């Protein structure tokens, strides 16, 4: 099981990466901060100074249809904001 699932590429995270050297990732829900730090350092070859994590629970929806009530939910995810050392950068667009 890999710790890093995918990078977060939104306007807010991209602006934060340009100003403060912080990058966002969607990570495995069982990963802790030490595992996230080691995975980012090994994958991108940068020095990680700080890791912040956020747990997002599933979003639940109920629909009323002709055939009855349908219940559904999205998956729970965990996000990590990683601050790298001054001078280090991560280029997500290099291997497109």
Image: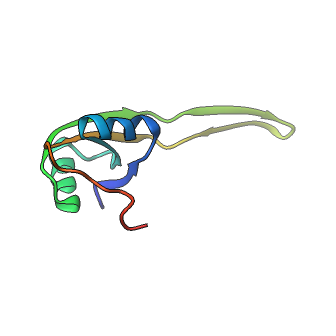
Say left or right for 65 vs 5.
Answer: right
Q: Nearer the viewer, residue 75 or 17?
A: 17
Q: How many marks?
A: 0
In this orientation, which residue lies closer to the viewer: 10 or 73?
Answer: 10
Q: Position of residue 81 (x, y in %)?
A: 28, 38
Residue at x 37% of width, y 36% of height = 15
Residue 90 coordinates in the image, percent (x, y): 27, 53
Is 85 on the left-hand or right-hand side of 15? left
Residue at position x 25%, y 35% in the image: 20
Of 19 and 23, which appears nearest the observer? 19
Q: Which quadrant does the C terminus fall into?
A: bottom left
From the top left corner, tell me how far across and down residue 65 is, in percent: 82, 36
Q: What sort of colour scheme is used for the picture? A: rainbow
Image: 10 above or below 40: above
Q: Which residue does the image show at 36% across and 64% down from the upper left? A: 94
Residue at 22% x, 61% y is: 43
**Residue farthest along the right direction in this orientation:** 66
- Place residue 77 in its image quadrant: top left
Q: Looking at the figure, which quarter contains the N terminus?
A: bottom left
Left or right, 50 with respect to 63, comes to: left
């Amino acid at each position: 099981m890999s710790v890093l699932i995918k990078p977060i590429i939104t306007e807010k995270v991209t602006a934060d990466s340009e100003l403060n050297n912080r990058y966002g990732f969607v990570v495995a829900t069982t990963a802790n901060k030490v595992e996230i730090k080691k995975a980012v350092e090994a994958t991108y070859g940068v020095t990680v100074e700080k890791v912040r994590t956020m747990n997002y629970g599933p979003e639940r929806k109920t629909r009323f249809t002709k055939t009855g009530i349908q219940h559904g939910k999205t998956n729970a995810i965990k996000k990590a904001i990683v601050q790298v050392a001054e001078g280090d950068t991560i280029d997500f667009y290099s291997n497109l």
